[in-house]
Image: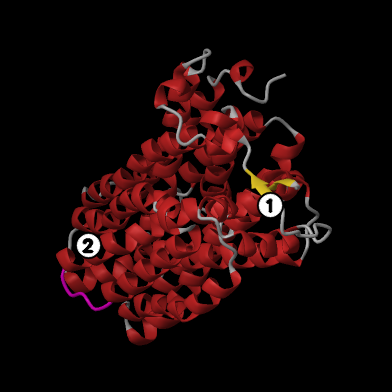
Amino acid sequence: MAQVDIHHLSDHAKFNGFHGIVLFWCALIIIFDGYDLAVAGIALPSIMKEMGVTPATAGYMVSSALFGMMFGAIFLGTIADKIGRRWAIVICIVLFSAFTAAAGLTTDPVSFSVTRFLAGLGIGGVMPNVVAQMTEYSPRKMRSTLVTLMFSGYAVGGMLAAVLGKGLIESYGWSYVFFAAAAPMVLIPFVLKSLPESMPFLVKTGRFDELKAIVQRLEPSYTPSASDEFALPAAHKAHGAPIGKLFQEGRGFSTLMFWVTFFMCLFMVYALSSWLTKLMASAGYSLGSALTFVLVLNFGAMIGAIGGGWLADRFHIKYVLLGFYALAAVSITLLGYKVPTEVLFILVGLAGASTIGTQILTYAYVGQYYPMSVRSTGIGWASGVGRSGAILAPIVIGILVGMKLPLEQNFMAIAIPAVIALISVALINTSRSATAH
């Protein structure tokens, strides 16, 4: 009778077509997720005009989806243990697609906010599930690369929203950019057919034939036999370590610094993705060119995420992050000043690379910092605290825009968090990291 350690098999498998399928579906789902998140910022100037709302109210309208994301990440992130990861992902796709499309039918701020909150449940809930799926099925030596590649789908979704926004808003009105979000529901049967179920879930529910078929595709050299028994390493059986563990062994201060960093980074990400179009339109750019800035922002984010991952594999991730946050502070501040359009595009690209791109790197750093037994607790708490920065950003910037301050002061308000993040990353104690030898 053979004992099969599925995690060992997964860690040491060579990349093949099966991995490619998992990457394809996870990245595609993240692209849809990114589209649904970016769409409100893209349409914001048109929505404000049509509904006649103040910048402060618009800020609350955008934040309603982010509130939904916070609850979605907590509840739909954990539902996979009960119903399996595939069904959890499908429920999230239905939520974010149907309710983003429904937001296109609304005519007042309250119903818009309610539909965006419900869409946010799916947008937030799908993230932990696809990250867990990609991590579980990636060979260990290329895990960071594959997860970073998948994550960059977010930026592709933002770019897609900007391109469709340019065509649809000017020709048909803002509602149509929201209606387009219903399209992914067509793919649900294919997701259920092609995406493999989580291996620990199959072990737990005794679906061993299904598991053997997956393991054989994952590692073609494995030949299943009737007597095979599947084992899970003890580390993977332990569920959710208590939060107190994050403050033990001299890691308490660094844990707080990670929380500050996440808060500041997500504040910048959501301030830019919610208000960039509106700020650029108020600076005198046409809606078309204001949307081009969103395209450039997300393109920069993709380069930043992939380039940052590459740099972090070669240099210490902490120093790469310090460089990125310094770049964010400078590039975002300069956005408020009159510069030639070409220079402005470069600055917007750098801002995308050093905020949205850096968010992914900051996740990676937290993951490497904590020992395996508390890793998911560490990431969960840091992103949970960070989520409050995401929720506050559209509201705070909305209030500032309503005060009719000069453009440079609005951008300075978005840049200050980069300086605080820079200081908090500098204060993280690397000697307490799980990867410190």
* Quarter holding residue 37: bottom left
| Residue at screen point 30% across, 54% down | 68
Residue 326 is situated, as x and y percent measured from the top left of the image, at 56, 34
Give the farthest residue toward the top. 250
Q: Which one is earlier in the sequence, the residue at label 1 or at label 2?
A: 2
Q: Name the amino acid, label 2.
A: Ser
- Whether 77 is drawn above or below 187: the answer is above
Q: Position of residue 336 (x, y in %)?
A: 43, 48
Identified at 50% across, 21% down, the residue is: 254
Q: Is mark 2 on a helix, strand or loop?
A: helix
Q: Where is residue 23 in the image (x, y as percent from the top left)?
A: 64, 62
> What's the residue at 74%, 62% (across, down)?
216
- Quarter of the image containing the C terminus? top right
Q: Residue 105: say if magenta.
A: yes
Q: Is residue 327 visible?
A: no
Q: For residue 113, which numbered disc appears in the image?
A: 2
Q: What stretch is highlighted in magenta?
A: 104-108
Q: How far apart are marks 1 and 2 (CA)?
A: 37 Å
Pointer 1 local density, CA inside 10 Å: few below 14, some 14–19, many at least 20: many
Would you say residue 249 is visible in this rendering?
Answer: yes
Please identify the residue farthest to the right as the structure is shown. 221
Please give the residue where the numbered disc 1 appears in the rendered image.
138
Dominant SS of magenta comes to: loop
Instruction: Tell me whether circle 1 and circle 2 mark residues in contact (CB < 8 Å).
Output: no
**Total labels drawn:** 2
Q: In this view, does 79 lie to the left or right of 25?
A: left
Which quadrant of the figure has residue 173? bottom left
Name the residue at 59% across, 39% down: 364
